[in-house]
Image (cartoon, rainbow, N blue to C red):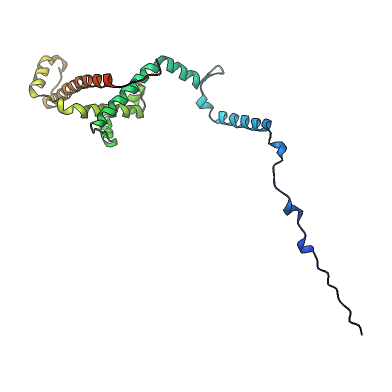
Amino acid sequence: MPVKKTITRKTTAGNKTDPAKTRKSFIPGSLITPKNLIIVGLLVLAIAFWFLKNYFIVATVNGQPVSRFELNTRLNSQFGSSVVDQLINERLLLGAVRQQGIFITTAEIDQRVKEIEKSLEGKMTLDAALKTQGLSSASFRRQLELQLSIEKMFAKDATVSASEIDEYLKNNQSLFPEATDTAKLKSEVEGFIKQQKISKLYEDWFNKIKQDAKISRNIE
């Protein structure tokens, strides 16, 4: 009896390729055009301007904006030269005292702040006092750093004798009509005379280092 051959056909179902898997993910090149890029860039700028509008616009007057650029231009024209002078003087001072090994720590500034707050005797807060002077806390602390640097630089050369204190009190009795605490009064006078001496020493010293410094100004 003849043996029938069974022909097994291999299915190719497992080898079929899913069109969804072979589909390439891409952005049509027609969307990436200079025109579309410009539009996207303008949208980004518009969104950024909306969130930062308070930075670019400092005020409005009947709907008309006052720009920060206008503010900066006006400030620069009116106060630019004096502010540059102040910055130059600060750089010269701090650079010179640091060359002498004098550095002011945060703790020293904090201590001076506490002393000033105590001197206000609760009549007003330090923040309120700074506000009346148009000073920020950061700029005030910067001024304290400069002041403390000067004091450290010349404190040893600005000693005050007892005879100087007595002579000052004798010549300025009318300034202290209600003084009752003699020790406290003498201490305050000593501090005043010492500050006068430090100021004179500093002025002479600073004029010399400024004269010798190489300064180039790009604003008048």
Q: Is residue 195 left or right of residue 162?
A: right
Q: Quadrant of residue 200?
A: top left
* Quadrant into which the N terminus falls: bottom right
Q: Residue at x 33, y 22 (%)?
A: 88
> Which percent across, then down, holds residue 28?
72, 40
Which residue is more in the foreground, 83 or 52?
83
Q: Is residue 113 visible?
A: yes
> Which percent across, then down, holds residue 134?
36, 22
Which residue is more in the foreground, 53 or 123?
53
Which residue is more in the foreground, 147 or 212?
212
Q: Is residue 203 above or below residue 153?
A: above
Q: Residue at x 34, y 25 (%)?
A: 130
* Quadrant into which the C terminus falls: top left
> Which percent across, then down, holds residue 118?
25, 30
Q: Residue furthest right?
A: 1
Q: Residue at x 52, y 24 (%)?
A: 56
